Amino acid sequence: FGGPLKCEKEYNVADAQNGVCRRQHVYSAAISPPRTPGRAAAIEQYNRAMNTPTEFPIAVSVYQARRERLLAAMRAAGGGVALVPTAPEALRNRDTDYPYRHDSYFYYLSGFTEPQSFLVLDATAQAGEPASMLFCRTKDAERETWEGFHYGPEAAREAFGFDAAFPIEALDAQLPRIIGDAPALFYGFGRSGERDGQVRRWLDAVRAQSRSGIVPPLKL
């Protein structure tokens, strides 16, 4: 609307049939407010913001340091792989989602706010191998028209300081390879039935390679 709504009249109406009182408000507002230059500029600025990356509220080095501290603690405990997914999107109706809010643990370690993302920390990685890996959405100009800016794996790796980044579609192919022969798997079961089932399938895929000498993590 063109400005703040003003309440002109407030009154109670008694419903004779069911005895329920309803509070009604009558507001004065133009149905089609004029498209002022200031309002048009605000809309244009909003549309630009949807398709540009957000500024970092915290230096990227802070998130890198947090990941390094966790990796160091995992190495001190004997090594292993940590799986940290972000929160799923919540569908509001057939074609609309609720406003998205990332998982706090995921954000604390990554600084990344896009949905459909997954962080993997490998404390058993050898020199030259990636220890911090991000799986995220690929660049897609058409989807970005509706969903806003996507970093894409390569840009996300450079912007957030990960050792490697992959498309989220590669998660099922990469995770059995990463967790194979790991001494431990760090993952919070019980928060998402769908995600728990996916992790169990990765473990089953590793167990299927036992004849090749590859074993699943000994500790969960």
Image (spheres, rainbow, N blue to C red):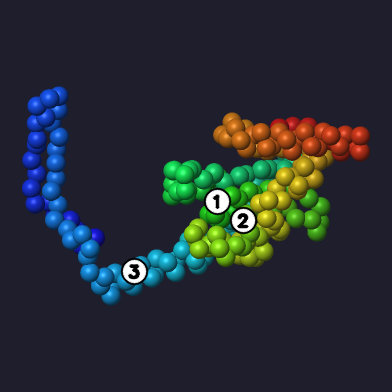
Image location of residue 32, percent across then percent down: 23, 63
The residue that label 3 is drawn on is 42
Quarter assignment of residue 162:
bottom right
Residue visible at 80% across and 45% down in the picture: 177
The residue that label 2 is drawn on is 137
Residue reaching furthest to the top = 18
Residue visible at 77% across and 33% down in the picture: 204
Instruction: Using the rendered image of the protein, determine whether residue 113 is visible from the camera's viewpoint.
Output: yes
Judging depth in this view, the residue of 75 and 14 nearest the camera is 14
Q: Which mark is residue 115?
A: 1
Image location of residue 96, percent across then percent down: 45, 48
Check disc 1 and report its element: helix, strand or loop: loop
Check disc 2 and report its element: helix, strand or loop: loop
**Mark before the other along the chain sequence, 2 or 1:** 1
**Mark before the other along the chain sequence, 3 or 2:** 3
| Left or right: residue 176 compared with residue 17 | right
